[in-house]
Image (spheres, rainbow, N blue to C red):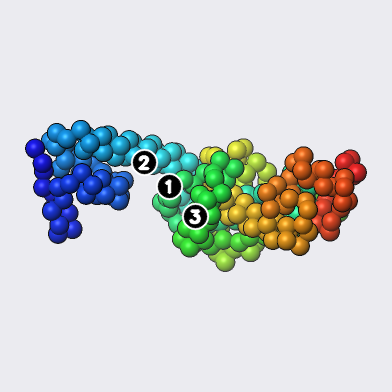
Amino acid sequence: MVLKLYFGGFVVTSVGEIAEVLKNAPCEEIPLIVERYKDDQRKSVKKLIETALRRYGKYINEMKRLEAISQIEECCYKDGARYIAGVDEVGRGPLAGPVVTAAVILKPGWRAEGVNDSKKLSEKKREELYEVIIRESEAYCITMEDNCVIDDINILNATLKAMKRAVEGLSIKPDVVLVDAVRIPDIDIKQQSIIKGDEKSISIAAASIIAKVTRDRLMTDMAKLYPGYDFENNKGYGTKKHIAALKERGLCPIHRLSFTKGIL
């Protein structure tokens, strides 16, 4: 039995056409489309349906995960907050380059498939989500403190300083600030410090993605200014290749003296 499905004004009957329809269907529409094909007895069509249903299952699981990591924000909204800022940093551990922080205010109920701790995402996915977050957020601010500041006041204080500037640089003053693991000193805004916040809060996760993409792009540019240290790949972290280059070439202007003195 071959079903004829009218899709966008066209009759869909071939396996190739059905495959195209299922492949391009939005995940939330898969059950409806599968319902139309469920009586097709062709083995190839059955396999296509199985594949589509697996994709739908992954989509449902992702929606549940996003709902779970939005609960902190939902509680804040219920308590009367209108604007919630997530804050995170990237680059506390590298031997070179700045520490970068981001503060992001998302729209209530905002979701985007894949938003998670930036370290758990591929570079391609981070880049995709970066554009979505920048475009769809209520407000965001990116700040950084360079290696000289890190050497002068230490990495923790440099991170807190950058976080404070990121919050103060938002075009909208938040009612609540959610921060990954630390507390930002000297801000007159209610804040929550959340351990592993980039895994538990969608706002912090979004901030981590923005900070990570920003710093990675910067370090790729630094690789052109200071070749030989493999910054384009290690982003300033202490890989074997980076340490070997340090011992051979010495320091470049973006290296952290306080992090490299033990190596040299």
Location of the C terminus (image quadrant): top right
| Residue 143 location (% of width, % of height) | 67, 60
Left or right: 223, with 132 as reference point: right
- The residue lying toward the viewer, choosing from 176 and 221, is 221
Give the CA separation, mark 2 to mark 1. 8 Å
Left or right: 146, with 14 as reference point: right
Label 1 Cα crowd, 10 Å radius (few <14 / some 14-19 / many 20+): few
Vertical position of residue 89 compared to residue 55: above or below: below
- The residue lying toward the viewer, choosing from 240 and 33, is 240
Q: Is residue 61 visible?
A: yes
Q: Is residue 85 visible?
A: no
- Residue, disc 1: 113
State yes or no: discs 2 and 1 in contact (Cβ < 8 Å): yes
| Sequence order check, earlier mark of 2 and 1 | 2
Amino acid identity at mark 1: Glu
- Name the mark nearer the viewer: 3 or 1: 3
- Residue, disc 2: 59
| Sequence order check, earlier mark of 3 and 2 | 2
Left or right: 167, with 97 as reference point: left
- Residue at 37 percent across and 37 percent down: it is 58
- Residue, disc 3: 128
Label 2 Cα crowd, 10 Å radius (few <14 / some 14-19 / many 20+): some
| Residue 111 location (% of width, % of height) | 42, 50
| Residue 172 location (% of width, % of height) | 55, 64
